[in-house]
Amino acid sequence: MKANRAILILEDGSTYYGWSFNSSSTVFGEVVFNTGMTGYQEVITDPSYSKQIINFTYPELGNTGINYEDMESQAPLLKGLIAKNICNRPSNWRHSMSLIEYLVQFQIMHIYGVDTRAITKHLRNVGTLNGSISSSSLNPSILLQNLRNIQDKKQTDLVLSACTREPYIFASCPAYEPFYFTNKDHTINIREDLHIIVVDFGVKNNILRYLNKYVNTITVVPADISYTDIMKYKPDGILLSNGPGNPEDLSYAIQTVTKLLSHNIPLFGICMGHQILSLALGLDAFKLKFGHRGLNHPVGYNKSISITSQNHGFAIHGKKATQSRLITTETNFNDHTIAGISHRNYPYFAVQYHPESSPGPHDADDLFLHFIRVIIAIQRLS
């Protein structure tokens, strides 16, 4: 497969030259960096990266190819990919195609042969920037002008293009192979006869896979579903999923969750779901300088620490006025932002990380079992 010359330019004029296997293509998007050493397939197919250009700091991608089991969505929603090197001879017993073949098949614009760690250092210094990758035009001044023209346009709702448009019953998802059981996996020997509603802001398949270990019925509904339609399902618990974009743009979701707070239905928020629940509870969101995207972010409380996978560009401000109702259960030890909240009186809790992600550590996956136990406890009390 022939490589073509390509260029990456950031909105501050920083320019990088490299190569791409896509010809005559140009994309624009927010350039973010991911520091994970593994899991490039899960990152590429994570709907939370919708419309973004991902800069991978790990120096080589594609060693294990692409398989069909580890996809986090039906199709990738990212705008582009930046890599130092891309392996064209994958070696893994599960792989079905090479990363290069996948990028070409889904027409994902990419550039390789650039110093991705230098780009990461630059973004850490100046903050997240918009950028453009092109193999059709190598003129930096033209690309920069086009990039600035696009920036003047208002960004559309990223969640509505990432979520399901119709409710559906989740059937099953192939288990990871090899699949290892831990002692806590045996604490529930059968799946509970519970009905969980998953509000889809851009849900990852592995969230549904984890829930499917513990419950019989999972209904996935659109992000803009009404409060009335949710209540028609008579849910035992509601999970607010991950998703892309700014949570403050989702006024419809915040209003729906605010109405749900008047009931005693257990709520569990993950990433975007955490932010939506927090805003409904009276907290505020803010944009991080360069976001949290990687596989080794330490969170916890006091001397209790978990290593977590994270992917978000926004975080939540605490408010003294809400301390009588809310507990900050976990803090991000890198920058002391809120990583988890819980309501003092009602079964509502949320985390600003991905407990379903398994990059090596499985420190946080027991939150799904905790969610089920909370639901069972509420049912016993009612």
Image: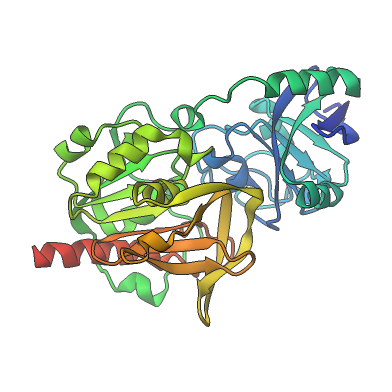
Q: Quadrant of the C terminus?
A: bottom left
Tell me what residue is drawn at x 46 percent, y 66 percent: 364
Locate residue 99, reporting x and y percent: 70, 39
Would residue 189 be visible to someone looking at this image? yes
The location of residue 357, given as percent across then percent down, is 51, 57
**x then y, percent, for residue 311:** 58, 50
Q: Is residue 152 above or below residue 185?
A: above
Q: Is residue 207 left or right of residue 315?
A: left
Q: Residue furthest front?
A: 321
Residue extending farthest to the left is 382
Left or right: 16 as drawn, with respect to 36: right
Q: How is the image coloured?
A: rainbow
For residue 3, say whether it is visible.
Answer: no
Image label count? 0
Instruction: Describe residue 52's horizontal placement relative to residue 147 as left or right.
Output: left
Q: Nearer the viewer, residue 139 or 343?
A: 343
Whether residue 238 is situated above or below residue 31 in the rendered picture: below
The residue located at (88%, 42%) in the rendering is 114
Nearest the camera: 174 or 107? 107
245 in relation to 161, above or below: below
Residue occupying the point 60% across, 70% down: 333
Please give the name of the residue rendered at 24% of the width and 60% of the height, measured from the top-left corner.
Answer: 191
Is residue 366 found left or right of 233 in the rendered image?
right
x, y percent for residue 217: 23, 47
* Quarter of the figure with residue 12: top right
